[in-house]
Image (cartoon, grey):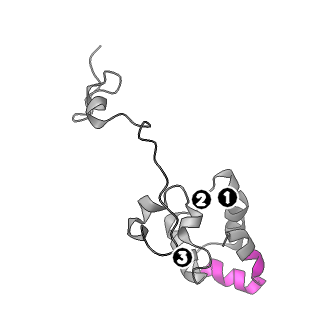
Amino acid sequence: MNLHPYLLSLKEHEREKLAALCKTTQGYLFKLARNFHKGMRAHPTLASLLERYTDQKVRRWELNPEDWFITWPEMVGCDGVPPLPVLNSQALPPASDAANDPNTGDATTGRLAAS
């Protein structure tokens, strides 16, 4: 479930309790919910706490859809978890090419290549 409708479904005192359990404020939870479409994401600790204290109605991978599998690799393959995104293999050069690239320098020493 999306965080915003979940928060709206709660009574004021229930939202206060949820915020306190998650060590945050109602205001921050609403800010997160309202700005999710703009790229705002929950810190992994907050995402885990929200999942726990919403009885898994709000899932941690919903709060971090782009990288949940990196943060919580143990979740990969579990029931209800979304499929892994297809990563663009062309996005990064192979490690061996990066080490020899004069623009990036030597990856083993961290030194830039001499001009």
Secondary structure, mark 3, is: helix
Secondary structure, mark 2, is: loop
Q: Is residue 78 magenta?
A: no
Name which residue lies at 25% across and 29% down.
106
Tell me the residue that label 2 is attached to: 41
Residue closer to the observer: 95 or 13: 95
How packed mark 2 is, by other alpha carbons closer than 10 Å (few <14, some 14-19, many 20 or more), is: some
Disc 1 or 2, which lies upstream in sequence?
1
Name which residue lies at 72% across and 75% down.
7
Residue 71: x %, y % from top left: 43, 62
Outermost top residue: 115
The mark closer to the camera, 1 or 3, is: 1
Amino acid type, residue under disc 1 in the picture: Phe
Tell me the residue that label 1 is attached to: 36
Disc 1 versus disc 3: distance between alpha carbons? 17 Å
The reply, left or right, for residue 8 in relation to residue 81 is: right
Find the magenta span and give its range: 7-20
- Tell whether label 3 touches label 2 (CB within 8 Å): no
How packed mark 1 is, by other alpha carbons closer than 10 Å (few <14, some 14-19, many 20 or more), is: some
Indicate the quadrant where residue 77 lies: bottom left
Tell me the residue that label 3 is attached to: 49
Disc 1 or 3, which lies upstream in sequence?
1
Secondary structure, mark 1, is: helix
Name which residue lies at 31% across and 21% down.
102
Q: Is residue 13 above or below residue 19?
A: below
